[in-house]
Image: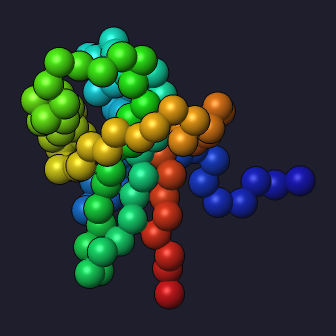
Amino acid sequence: MKILGRVDQATKVRGLFIHPGQVKEVIGRYPQIEKYRLVVTTKDQKDEMTLQLGLKEEPPSLESFKFQVEKSIRDVLKVRGNVELVPPGTIAEGSKIIEDQRTWV
């Protein structure tokens, strides 16, 4: 049986390919992150990235932490992305690192 389509999780966002290893590089800079998932969506016909984070422990300043992670996203992925802190249990065990929720018409 042949494999049809892509078998990796690399996703093209705003003309650049985003690979799971790049997301792991961003996450590796912050030991307080327990689980994570990069969600790609479309809003007003433009790609949007949101890095959802489940934390082991809450940092002293949430806004400062989110700003630092967003800066790391720009530095590593070369594309701007948002950070969303999610409650425990939101990100399932074994879920994809990059989840593309865009629909193609």
Residue at (49% x, 64% y) in the render: 101
Residue nearest the observer in this picture, 54 or 20: 54
Residue at (33% x, 12% y) in the render: 31
Residue nearest the observer in this picture, 42 or 93: 93
Image coordinates of residue 20 in percent, x first then y, are: 44, 35
- Looking at the rendered structure, the number of numbered marks drawn on it comes to 0
User: Image quarter for residue 76?
Assistant: top left
User: Image quarter for residue 12?
Assistant: bottom left
Residue at the limit of the structure toward the top, as seen here: 31
Residue nearest the observer in this picture, 55 or 23: 55
Whether residue 75 can be seen here: no
Residue at the limit of the structure toward the right, as seen here: 1
- Height in image: 7 above or below 91? below
User: Image quarter for residue 43?
Assistant: bottom left
Image coordinates of residue 19 in percent, x first then y, are: 41, 40
Q: Is residue 78 left or right of residue 5?
A: left
Whether residue 50 can be seen here: yes
Image coordinates of residue 55 in percent, x first then y, are: 39, 24
Residue at (46% x, 37% y) in the render: 87
Image coordinates of residue 85 in percent, x first then y, are: 34, 39
- Height in image: 12 above or below 45? above
Residue nearest the observer in this picture, 7 or 34: 34
Residue at (30% x, 21% y) in the render: 58
